[in-house]
Image (spheres, grey):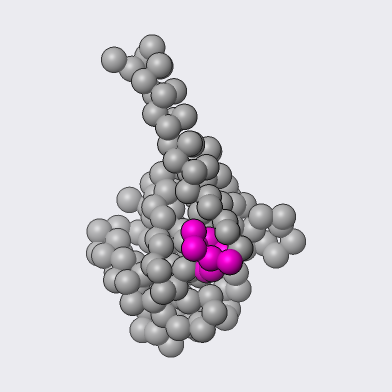
Amino acid sequence: MAIYMFIDGVLRNTVTNAPIPEGMRLYRTFKDKGRVMLLCNNKERDDRWLRENKTNLVDDLLDSDPTSEWPALDQVKKARGSAHVELVVTADPELAAKLLELGVTTLMFLHPIYLTEKFRPDGRQGAKSWDSIRNEIVRQQETFVEDSRIQ
């Protein structure tokens, strides 16, 4: 099993840099069952942060390309090119919607305390991306039902 998990928003609070306990537990749960690759923005800094927070036995730490237009999406695409991506864990609803469009199984990690305000339905920026995620799931389900190869 190969699971890819983003550090920012899942394991680490992007505002305070503190670990998110529920995200760390989720990581350890997946790690007990298989390989978990961590997706990061700065490999050297994030490796140090992980060790400081008692996460030493990391399967792999995949750095992003800062010149990319959408670094997180490109990280997953690159991972898909070299290995089977069974699951991606992210706290970014826009990324999750795009991954669903690409057919990647995605787990949204949303914690009300640590969730970035721009993604909260009650946030001042008013980003309500749940509709687009729901619409994509419905579209994929309809495509699956209408596929004549599946009975």
- Visible in this render: residue 112? yes
Q: Determine the residue positioned at 42% across, 32% down.
A: 138
Vertically, is 116 above or below 130? below
The foreground one among 105 and 45 is 105
In the visual, does 41 lie left or right of 96?
Answer: right
Closer to the camera in the image, 115 or 50: 115
Task: Give the main secondary structure, helix, strand or loop, of the magenta stretch.
Answer: loop
Residue 80 shows in this picture:
no
Q: Residue furthest top?
A: 148
Q: What's drawn in magenta, residue-wise? A: 116-124
Is residue 123 a member of the stretch shown in magenta? yes
- Residue 4 in the image, given as x and y percentages of width and height: 44, 57
The residue located at (29%, 15%) in the rendering is 151
Residue at 39%, 46% in the rendered image: 86
**Which quadrant of the structure image shows residue 140?**
top left
Residue 127 x %, y %: 57, 56
Indicate whether residue 50 is drawn in magenta: no
Total label count?
0
Instruction: Please state the horizontal and vertical placement of residue 89, each as a whole percent of the image.
Output: 42, 57
Q: In the image as oriented, which residue stretches furthest toward the right?
A: 67
Question: Where residue 107 appears, x then y in whole percent?
Answer: 39, 52
Residue at screen point 44% across, 23% down: 143
Seen in the picture, residue 108 relative to 38 is either above or below; the reply is above
